[in-house]
Image (tube, helix red, strand yellow):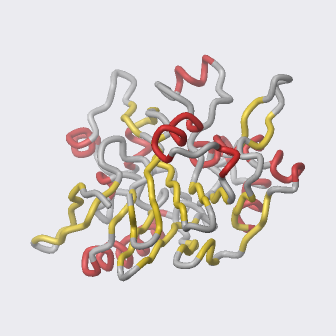
Amino acid sequence: MQFGDYRVEIIPDTEFRLDGGAMFGVVPRTLWSRVCPPDDQNRIRMNMNCVFIDTGHLRILIETGIGDKWSAKHREMFGITRQRSLADSLRAIAGVEPDSIDVVVNTHLHFDHAGGNTELNEAGKAVPAFRNARYFIARAEVAHADEPSERDRASYLPDSWQPLVASGQLKLQPADYEVAPGLRMETYAGHNRSMQCWRLQREGQTLFGFADLVPMRAHVPFAWIMGYDLYPAETLAVKKQLLPQAAREGWTCLFYHDPDEPLCKLVEEDGKLRAEGCEL
């Protein structure tokens, strides 16, 4: 798909499941279950929609999904229903090999955003999955991942980033920076203090990746905030800033975890925002 002069493709990783109560925080189950029906373990369907961007000079992959380094126990726990690897999806959808990726960008290092940074070699050791890529991660996020809080410690798996340090492929970045012309990473506190969202602007159009600030279409209402967020009041403030702007300016929005329609436009009606599915 063309987005201005860049080629952009959505690369879904795999469906998985997390607890619905955790995903919606203080929102009552009677409300969130209408839009995200839970299974018999109270888990809801989710996906991880990574993004491939070809600028003509760089091949960029934003996020790498959950990865393949999971035991049978954890695949069952998270309801991982993998049909094909992220590498095979990249080949099938974008027509490129993992070794041709120049830059991998992580918004943050939780296992469902950075798990595919690495893979297991024949000896069972985690090694970079994109052998020729530079990996761009915010310096503050790596520092937090190395010393996480008790609340989010389980979300950080060191084999998602430590092998990149050893290989020399990890390139630490500031809070806000430009990956390529028109593609910027911007830090927004809420989920934690160092998670980034991304903004692509080409030829008068904006494509905005909300990462875990607004993980699914169901999280568009301001107060629908994940229980996983370390700073929910700050999430609320940022949502009130960005979502009305997205509606006014006609941004195309990428909701990373939405299993059905990750690309949306926001529409305001009677003072409320809702997401409508769209294409690039």
- Image position, residue 173 (x, y; %): 73, 71
- Image position, residue 274 (x, y; %): 21, 62
Work out whether residue 77 or residue 2 is closer to the camera in this orientation and state it. 2
Q: Quadrant of the N terminus?
A: bottom left
Taking 176 as reference, is 5 left or right?
left
Taking 279 as reference, is 133 left or right?
right
Work out whether residue 75 or residue 105 is closer to the camera in this orientation and state it. 105
Taking 41 as reference, is 249 left or right?
left
Q: Residue at x 40, y 72 (%)?
A: 4
The image quarter in which residue 259 lies: top left
Q: Is residue 80 visible?
A: no
The image quarter in which residue 205 lies: bottom left
For this orientation, the residue located farthest to the top is 72
Q: Residue at x 71, y 75 (%)?
A: 174
- Image position, residue 83 (x, y; %): 47, 25
Location of residue 195 with respect to 237 vertically, above or below: above
Q: Quadrant of the C terminus?
A: bottom left
Q: Residue at x 81, y 50 (%)?
A: 164
Q: Residue at x 79, y 54 (%)?
A: 146
Location of residue 86 with respect to 240 vertically, above or below: above
